[in-house]
């Protein structure tokens, strides 16, 4: 599985781990990295043996943004013709629960990539920011949208207009990350959370991801209707029968992921 140029991929039980690996560029996201992450994550997503994906970087950087050197000289018409970086949307839409395990810098596209995941676990060394304005642009992989939904308008404006970095504690307080842990236990915690999620029924967890994400896309009434329909529909899965039977029989469920 390690035939990729910019990432490392490994499996730990039902968890797939993708590690961004361009240390000399602080994991800056070039086209190759986008293609590698997309290929690896799509393969893990389709694999019935994988119930959660952890995306991580190095101790120093989750990712320091899109690759400024690769991008800098492109023209507006290049960007439009290539529909530059739009394929990241495919990553964001994968339904297998995705956890970003962030240590060090998560800046620009790196912060946006973390926000494409379903939840973010941060080391106490993590630094989040959208510094694009200091480069004469604005966020382009969802920063103005997902950051605003995650932390609210006031803090999103503050971050995006000043380009300042937010530490892990502020990120947790603001609702961007679900937990902050000491840097040396980041991967243990991320793998524990991912392992727990992966022990659930995969299709049920995938429906939960879609249902939570629907909260960002629609009105409350439509979202509630969507949730209820999904809830009803899950009664046609083997795992609902197993989960409820196991409770009644006072044993652990043995999900078949069907
Ligand atoms: N792109 C390319 N190379 C980078 C990047 C990057 N984003 N970040 C760091 N590097 C490189 C540096 O150039 C340096 O390379 P070299 O050794 O060859 O000079 C190497 O990584 C190490 O970096 P530093 O020496 O700068 O390390 P420091 O510890 O001094 O500083 C920082 C770390 C603060 C993280 C600093 O590197 C930095 O500010 N990086 C840039 C952060 C940034 O501005 N990110 C936003 C990029 S723009 C973006 O992400 C837009 C996404 C939307 C695109 C979607 C379009 C539709």
Image (cartoon, rainbow, N blue to C red):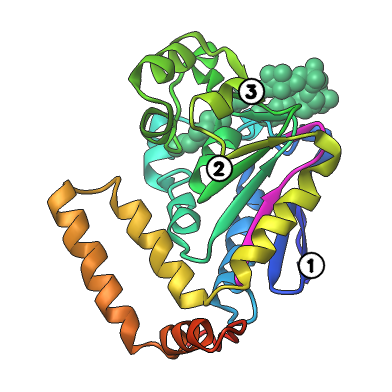
At mark 3, the secondary structure is: helix
At mark 1, the secondary structure is: loop
Q: Is residue 39 visible?
A: no
Select label 2 or label 3 by which is in front.
3
3D distance between C-alphas at marks 2 and 3: 19 Å
Q: Which residue is mark 2?
A: 113
The one of 64 and 168 positioned closer to us in this rendering: 168
The structure residue drawn at horizontal position 47% and vertical position 85%, both measured from the top left corner, is 239
Q: Is residue 165 above or below residue 258?
A: above
Q: What's drawn in magenta, residue-wise?
A: 51-61
Point out the quarter of the image occupied by ligand 1.
Answer: top right
The structure residue drawn at horizontal position 28% and vertical position 72%, both measured from the top left corner, is 230
Please give left or right for residue 224 compared with residue 135 in the image.
left
3D distance between C-alphas at marks 3 and 1: 36 Å
Task: Please report whichever mark, 2 or 3, sits nearer to the chain's N-terminal start.
Answer: 2
Identify the residue at the far top of this view.
162
Q: Which residue is mark 3?
A: 169
Q: Which quadrant, please, contains the N terminus?
A: bottom right
Q: Is residue 101 visible?
A: yes
Instruction: Decide: few, some or many residues near mark 1? Use Cα within 10 Å; few <14, some 14-19, many ≥20.
Output: few
Q: Which residue is mark 1?
A: 3
Is 159 within the magenta? no
3D distance between C-alphas at marks 1 and 2: 22 Å
Q: Is residue 253 above or below residue 85?
A: below
The one of 112 and 3 positioned closer to us in this rendering: 112
The one of 138 and 202 positioned closer to us in this rendering: 202
- CB within 8 Å, label 2 to label 3: no
Task: Please report whichever mark, 3 or 1, sits nearer to the chain's N-terminal start.
Answer: 1
């Amino acid at each position: 599985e390690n035939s990729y140029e910019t990432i490392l991929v490994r499996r730990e039980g039902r968890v797939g781990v993708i590690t961004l690996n361009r240390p000399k560029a602080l994991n800056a996201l070039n086209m190759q990295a986008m293609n590698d992450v997309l290929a690896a994550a799509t393969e893990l997503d389709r694999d019935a043996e994988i119930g959660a994906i952890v995306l991580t970087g190095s101790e120093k950087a989750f990712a320091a943004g899109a690759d400024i050197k690769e991008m800098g000289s492109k023209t507006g018409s290049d960007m439009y013709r290539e529909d530059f970086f739009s394929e990241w949307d495919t990553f964001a839409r994968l339904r297998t629960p995705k956890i970003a395990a962030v240590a060090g810098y998560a800046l620009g596209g790196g912060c946006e990539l973390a926000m494409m995941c379903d939840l973010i676990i941060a080391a106490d060394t993590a630094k989040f920011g959208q510094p694009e304005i200091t480069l004469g642009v604005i966020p382009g992989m969802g920063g103005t949208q997902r950051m605003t939904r995650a932390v609210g308008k006031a803090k999103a404006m503050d971050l995006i207009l000043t380009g300042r970095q937010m530490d892990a504690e502020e990120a947790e307080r603001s609702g961007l990350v679900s937990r902050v842990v000491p840097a040396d236990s980041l991967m243990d915690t991320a793998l524990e959370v991912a392992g727990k999620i992966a022990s659930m029924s995969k299709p049920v967890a995938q429906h939960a991801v879609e249902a939570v994400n629907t909260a960002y896309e629609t009105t409350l009434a439509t979202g509630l209707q969507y949730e209820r329909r999904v809830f009803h529909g899950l009664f046609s899965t083997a795992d609902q029968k197993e989960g409820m039977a196991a409770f009644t029989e006072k044993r652990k469920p043995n999900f078949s992921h069907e």
